[in-house]
Image (cartoon, coloured by chain):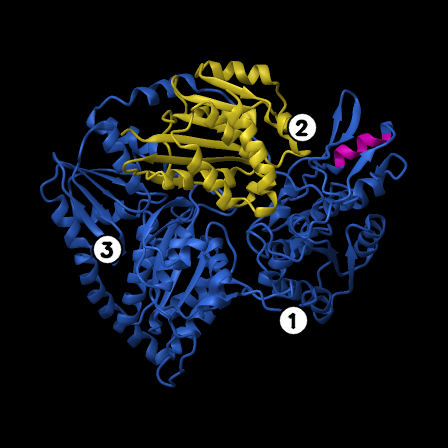
Amino acid sequence: MKSFNLIITGYGGQGILTLTEIISNAALKQGYDVKEAELHGLAQRGGSLDCHIRLGKKIHSPLITRGKADLIIALEATEALRACYWANKKTVILTNSKIFRINTNLKRILNKIKGITKNLHVVNADEIVKKMTGDITAVNIFMLGYALSKGLLPLKKEFVWKAVEEKIRKRFLEENKKVFEEAVKKK
Amino acid sequence: MKDIITNKKRGFLFGNEAIVRGALESGIGYAASYPGTPASEIGDCFAKIAKDIGVYFEWSTNEKIALEGAAGAAFSGVKSLVSVKHYGLNVASDSLLPLVYLECPLVVVIADDPGCFSSVQTEQDSRWYSKLGKIPTLEPSNSQEAKDMTKFAFQLSSKYKIPVMIRLTTRVCYSKSLVNFNKIIKGKAKGKFLKKEFKLGSSQTVELHKKLLEKLNKIKKESEKSCFNLVEKGKGNVGVITSGVSYDYIKEAMQELNIKLPLLKIGFSFPFPVEKVKNFVKNLKEVIIVEEVDPILEEEVRKITNIEIYGKDLFPKAGELKPEHVLIGIAKILNKPLPEELEENIEKFNIKVEKRIPFFCPGCPHRATFYAVKKVLGKDKIFGGDIGCYMLGAYSPYKMQDFVVSMGASIGVSHGIAKTTSKKPVIFIGDSTFFHAGVPALLNLVYNKADALVIVLDNRWTAMTGHQPNPGTGLTGAGEVTKQIDIEEIAKACKVDFVKTSNVYNFNQFCKDIKEAYNKKGVSVIIAKGECRLAAVRRLIKQGIKLPKFSVVKQNSKLSELMEFGCPAIKKEKGKFVIDKDLCWGCAVCKQLFPEFIKVEK
């Protein structure tokens, strides 16, 4: 099998590391060889952050080679565009419509992305999650469920949810489950 | 992190975690560190598990002291390890180099940061220390090797009574892969100090040096036959020599290009396995050398052979080495086409995306400090910066750092400026940095009669690296309550001319204190106190306490001043100032600035 290359991106503080850990863990449960690359440090303070997950039979490099991503999940739209460094015309991009602290607009960003790949899904995750829970903490879990519902991840829902359960603190699990199930329903 | 101490057969670990697992499988008894990313999590892991597993762990006040403690433990027969980032090694090097002469069986883990993801100083390649200090060195390329090499480092250091260095890079520290486990061996945390020959002295030093050289000859034999210096057979007369994470990039590139070149992976890089390399290049016409940062392998190989060598002429000399660099370089030499997707991306992706500048968290005490100083003293003073989150004070809307050099250098460099200009520098230094290297510099300011204002940004934690405790926190690395060192008392003992501790969240009084301190002649110290908001908020959420939220109740043109304050929660939408409730962490400074227009929500 060819490896599956996934970029998860956004800005520091959006729960990207959590999402990355959940997906890697689900992939391991499903029996893949997995490598993951992330960065720590100033990310908490609003910088760009891209995490790489690669799964397959035997993975060498933890970093994805330029142009070789299969899927990009972006929790913020300008970061989706930035991550197009790893995209080709077949790459699927799932992005939150949010733009945070960058002077641009969504239309401009999406047009530029379409110059690289037409396989684009845009969802207003912040608004949906805020309506459901009152804040935007669970946007990462929503994007995960949404990617599953669209069949973008080569992972089974049961493994993914098991990985969520192992990662999210008990007190917040109920709320995350609600968000996850809502996202999984979206076809 | 919980994966490290499991009894399972394998775990999915970061390189940093694998180092800890390797140490546990070696019977470690003592570990010490000073936080520095990308090495911070090695200490974090020990901090979390030390007590349960019977290992002594400490966050020391700086890297030199961490290393010295580990050496003391090693001299007492306890297996010990010290972990630091590349710049931390420079601080520790003063003691590391003599310890190599002194027969100290110690494991030194050092994490370089090519690409400077979490370092402002330099892209230092710490492998130069191998040669400078004659220190046996191992270079893992993934988590499994990080664990295996840690175990081997303990064996080698015990066998030859010598410090052994493990050199990591950011991508090894922060990539996760599966690691096979062996049994954890319970080490001893108590030993016995035997009084004998641990002495350097003019008559002995040269003798110890000779002895070290003999020892290195023996260790070189180990390196020649080591399984970490591995030949992988391939086709053709172009070979590859590599080390560290670059190995994975080569394997990836060869898979992409559908080729299999003869490959020598150097994992045990000092003493350099000369014979093995000679043997490897014997039947080759050309060799490609792939390594991150400096051409250290390349220089060694050039000494050995006259065949054509491709190295740093082909790959970047600065910045992180990426898989595509390796792929493009190898394809070029072999005259192979690049993969379609890469070609396509190079052609199409020439988009410039505005760089995202990190910012102080909402409610961060440092924001209040920079804003107060700007308000009271203006932006034109000379501002000395140091290492910590407050480096972000260099960015808009503050732009209040004229230099950042190294730990404690805010004070040291400002001293020279104060002595040679008529300006009075304003110095920003964090609590942990102050304990680490600021105290001797403060003494120097006072002793040599400078005129300067030192602002110690005391947020109670070593925050940037992940909230490790420091002497001001009142907790040890293992989480035990300890004496809390008061920075004001230290300043007084240093006989500064004026000192005051001021709560940054009591904003108007804080401004008055800054003004008073600046106007005093001589050395003034303001301790700008306010706990790291991120740490505080996390604790409050855990306790189920809701944060107060603020909102703009009346619009006014004066509110445009808030843009100078630079809180990410405050923005202007359709001509109106609003506070984003998803971002506001309730510090209340904006309300103190504009009590008529901003109120707390009921």
Q: Which residue is mark 1?
A: B483
Q: Which residue is mark 3?
A: B272
Mark 3 and mark 1 on one chain: yes
The picture's colour for chain A is: yellow
- What x and y, as percent, mark residue B43? 48, 59
Range drawn in magenta: B558-564
- Asked if residue A45 lies in the magenta stretch, the reply is no
The picture's colour for chain B is: blue
**Which callout, 3 or 1, points to the residue nearer the camera?**
1
* Chain letter for the residue marked with disc 3 in the picture: B
* Proximity of marks 3 and 2: CB atoms separated by less than 8 Å: no
* Chain letter for the residue marked with disc 1 in the picture: B
Asked if residue A48 shows in the view, the reply is yes
At label 1, the amino acid type is: Lys
Q: Nearer the viewer, residue B102 or A110?
A: A110
Q: Is residue A186 above or below residue B388?
A: above
* Proximity of marks 3 and 1: CB atoms separated by less than 8 Å: no
At label 3, the amino acid type is: Phe
Along the polypeptide, which appears first: circle 3 or circle 1? Answer: 3
**B24 displayed left or right of B235:** right
Residue at point 37%, 84% (across, down): B194
Element marked by disc 3: loop
- What x and y, as percent, mark residue B55? 45, 69
> Crowding at label 1, few (<14), some or many (≥20) Cα neighbours within 10 Å?
few
Residue at point 46%, 13% (across, down): A115
Please tell me whether the stretch drawn in magenta is mainly helix, strand or loop: helix
At label 2, the amino acid type is: Lys
- What x and y, as percent, mark residue B449? 71, 64
Q: Which residue is mark 2?
A: A131
Q: CA distance from mark 3 to mark 2?
A: 62 Å
